[in-house]
Image (cartoon, rainbow, N blue to C red):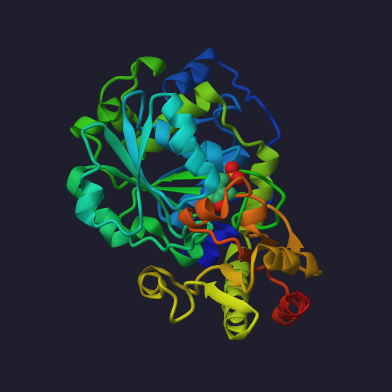
Amino acid sequence: MKIETICVQGGYEPKSGDPRVLPLYQSTTYYYKTPEEMAHLFDVPKDGHIYSRISNPTTACYEDKIAKLEGGVGAMATGSGMSAIMAAVMNVAQKGDNVLSAASIYGGTFNLFKITLPRLGIDTKFFTNDMSEEQIEALIDENTKALFIETIANPAMVVCDFDKFARICKKHGILFMVDNTLATPYHVRPLEHGANIVIHSSTKYLDGHASCVGGVIVDGGNFEFDGNPRYKAFYTPDASYHDITYTQEGGAAAYILKARMQYMRDMGLTPSPFNSWLTNMGSETLHLRMERTSANALALAKILKASDKVDWVMYPGLEDDEYHEIAKKYYKNGFGGMLVFGVKGGRKDAENFIRNLELIKQVTHIADVRSCVLHPASTTHRQLSDADLIAAGIKPTTVRLSLGIENIDDIANDVINALNKI
Ligand SMILES: *Cc1c(COP(=O)(O)O)cnc(C)c1O
């Protein structure tokens, strides 16, 4: 099936007489008549559902759809994007280990890697966009368990050069993890470019309606754990689950089986079945929303570029954008719905632009069907001085705009009026 068809029909196949639409199983527990049936599931958990902290039929269908959309062998949905990233890392790294991460990443992830995981004994070595392959390789040691990067960094708009990072990871036998939240599989499928694990904040485009916080991890099934000294926990018996060996029990889906049996079971990162059901419904229109949102973003990027009230625009779909050539290599069907631009003048002018908008609302969100806007310097990054802001790749005049699926004329009028009223 092509992406568009998977969006609509993937993950749920009704049998004769079943509901046509994915049913919501809002149940914590599952009935089995015989002790033997129940015992079997404790031995081979992937054969059925026991308890909704670990798995649920509605969530399972939604997970299957996302796995198919990304071209993976399995997926695990979580209660948030942050818990997906945490579980994805903890599934391979423990006390004494480290991960490599791009420095330009989502602020919440940066804090997780910089402060919270180190408190648990998992360190992060950050690499910057200007570092060569050799410089990044020099950061790798025997305890390095993953390389993490975003397909397109939020909000720095740096596009990932997959070939470069896939080469590094292959050479050193390290898991390649990609946060594909902003690109979505409609535009980029990281597993086709050498990634092994894909992560989403489903709060964004997968849901698309700003109604459910959630996350999901997709297992590419394309990493050889067996015999790799970095990943002994995958091919030696695990005392935490009566000596299960994940590569034997899970086969190609060993990674996601381990994530579920250890982290979902022990830490309870579970999404509610209702959120899985809503997010699944949102994902049915992912392809249509991405098509419109990308077209709107490109059109607005060109309008902004031509405005004398605007200093600069970053959008990978613009031909003279710093990342256009890289983006062209990996993106299909457009370049996504988020752009960043600088209002001419100073911090106050950017704030006034936000104040002047009417249709486009200021929210701490992106990837909604409704266009939305944020001024990082006075909100998400407000503690930073102007000098620290610039070091973080954000200017005092930077505005982040996430295009919705409204009519482009209404969006553009709102933006132009707000710029003219500054
Ligand atoms: C929002 C976001 C996250 C965090 O996800 P939550 O669902 O808010 O926990 C992670 N990565 C990226 C790229 C995001 O945009």
> In this image, 19 relative to 32: left or right?
right
Residue 100 in sight here: yes
Residue 65 in sight here: no
Residue at 41%, 63% (x, y): give it. 159
> In this image, 170 relative to 83: left or right?
left
Residue 155: % across, % down: 53, 58
Residue at 59%, 34% (x, y): give it. 56
The relative height of residue 26 versus residue 345 in the rendered view (above or below) is above
> In this image, 345 relative to 245: left or right?
right
Residue 3: % across, % down: 49, 64
Q: How many marks?
A: 0
The relative height of residue 70 versus residue 58 in the rendered view (above or below) is below
The relative height of residue 73 versus residue 83 in the rendered view (above or below) is below
Residue at 51%, 39% (x, y): give it. 111
Seen from the viewer's position, the closer of residues 168 and 58 is 168
Q: Quadrant of the C terminus?
A: bottom right
Residue 310: % across, % down: 61, 77
> In this image, 16 relative to 361: left or right?
left
Seen from the viewer's position, the closer of residues 221 and 415 is 415
Seen from the viewer's position, the closer of residues 370 and 112 is 112
Q: Quadrant of residue 9?
A: bottom right
Residue 146: % across, % down: 32, 40
Residue at 59%, 70% (x, y): give it. 342
